């Protein structure tokens, strides 16, 4: 089954053709990051307008690269939640028109389920059940993936997402947006151990996380150094910051895996590209005897192929939608289908 898939929930417009949820026939992405870099973060209206400009051309490219015509496409999958609502609506409306015009089913896909499914593309042997750490620019959570479309959130951030925190910390260190990758590169120049940063605990919910205190601590540290004219060891701060984020995440993944009785662990989302978090997960995997799956870097960030992968399994579960399908800015990954009913 060949699925044409779309992703437009933030600042990447992406289209892909994926066969049977596992084989990428094409995957094209138009990133707007340079444009938003001018403002130090994503400007929602600009994001929506850029998606509108490029989505039709990307579709033609995705079909051409896959060696497909419209007659070869069996269904259309699209991110319908969560994300910047205007941006999501562009992709959803376009996908609806394609599905309607070509007379094929429309499959709405939860963006974070897509991030987890990116691993199905990289690892043919991976099958649920497993535990997933999903960390992106807008979400951070630990999810028990019981089956391809049945999931349970075991812990989540109570405030900022880890990626957002990386982006804000990068900004005060004078690094470009999106800041996760440049922070990672800067951190590799230091062993750290210079700055003591706070760790958060949520009373009564040991698997929940909080990143806003950590973010504020880095911002205050940088501003204070600037005001009093103290030199700032930027590389050490980047290293200690990444270490602190990883220490929020990895010990909780260990606890969650023990609680859920899972020995297979998967990472997903843009922040899963972080070298310190990956190294800490690998260490934990050795200690806990996990089968650990870390997606290749190009599958960590937003892409269309991951939506095609999850779309296939949503289709098998009967999760197709009519032309009244709506978009949602927020939606839990474990919300029953159809959403909003
Ligand atoms: O998954 P993603 O591409 O988009 C969302 O769905 O949000 O994640 C983007 C986030 C950004 O916050 C970016 O700074 C972060 O992933 N990121 C990283 C790294 N590469 C990207 N964060 C830490 N270390 C990295 N190497």
Image: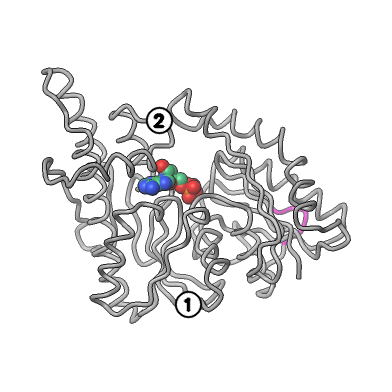
**Closer to the N terminus: mark 1 or mark 2?**
1
Q: Residue at x 52, y 56 (%)?
A: 299
Q: Secondary structure at mark 2?
A: loop
Q: Residue at x 51, y 58 (%)?
A: 115
Q: In the image, is 220 to the left or to the right of 305?
A: left
Q: In the image, is 122 to the left or to the right of 275?
A: right
Residue for badge 2 = 176
Instruction: Give the tally of numbered discs.
Output: 2
Question: In the depicted view, which residue is nearer to us: 312 or 107?
Answer: 312
- The magenta span reads 321-325
Residue 324 percent coordinates (x, y): 74, 53
Quadrant position of the C terminus in the picture: bottom right
Residue for badge 1 = 146
Does residue 161 appear in this view? no
Q: Between marks 1 and 2, how big is the CA–CA gap? A: 38 Å
Q: Is residue 187 magenta?
A: no
Residue 308 percent coordinates (x, y): 66, 61
| Res 165 → quadrant | top left
Residue 162 percent coordinates (x, y): 35, 48
Residue 172 percent coordinates (x, y): 29, 28
Quadrant position of the N terminus in the picture: bottom right
Q: Residue at x 88, y 61 (%)?
A: 71
Protein image colouring: one colour
Q: Is mark 1 within 8 Å of ligand 1?
A: no
Furthest residue toward front: 189
């Amino acid at each position: 089954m060949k699925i044409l898939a779309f992703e437009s929930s933030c600042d990447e417009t992406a289209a892909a053709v994926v066969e049977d949820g596992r084989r990428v026939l094409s995957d094209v992405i138009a990133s707007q990051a340079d444009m938003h870099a001018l403002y130090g973060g994503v400007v929602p209206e600009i994001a929506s307008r850029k998606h509108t400009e490029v989505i039709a051309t990307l579709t033609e490219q995705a079909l051409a690269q896959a060696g497909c015509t419209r007659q070869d496409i069996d269904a259309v999958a699209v991110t319908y939640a969560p994300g910047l609502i205007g941006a999501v609506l562009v992709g959803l409306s376009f996908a609806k028109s394609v599905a309607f015009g070509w007379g094929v089913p429309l499959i709405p896909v939860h963006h974070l389920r897509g991030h987890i499914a990116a691993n199905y593309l990289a690892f043919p042997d991976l099958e649920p059940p497993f535990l997933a750490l999903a960390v992106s620019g807008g979400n951070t959570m630990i999810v028990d993936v019981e089956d391809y479309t049945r999931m349970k959130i075991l812990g989540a951030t109570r405030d900022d997402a880890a990626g957002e925190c990386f982006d804000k910390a990068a900004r005060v260190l004078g690094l470009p947006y999106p800041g996760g990758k440049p922070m990672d590169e800067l951190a590799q120049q230091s062993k750290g151990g210079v700055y003591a940063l706070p760790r958060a605990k949520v009373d009564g919910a040991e698997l929940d996380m909080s990143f806003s205190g950590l973010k504020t601590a880095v911002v205050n540290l940088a501003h204070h150094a600037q005001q009093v004219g103290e030199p700032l060891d930027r590389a050490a701060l980047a290293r200690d910051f990444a270490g602190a984020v990883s220490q929020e995440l990895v010990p909780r993944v260990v606890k969650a895996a023990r609680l859920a009785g899972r020995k297979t662990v998967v990472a997903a989302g843009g922040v899963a590209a972080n070298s310190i978090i990956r190294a800490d997960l690998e260490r934990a995997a050795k200690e806990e005897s996990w089968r650990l799956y870390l997606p290749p870097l190009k599958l960590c960030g937003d892409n269309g192929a991951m939506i095609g992968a999850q779309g296939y399994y949503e289709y098998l579960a009967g999760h197709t939608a009519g032309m009244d399908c709506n978009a949602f800015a927020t939606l839990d990954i474990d919300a029953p289908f159809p959403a909003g009913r």
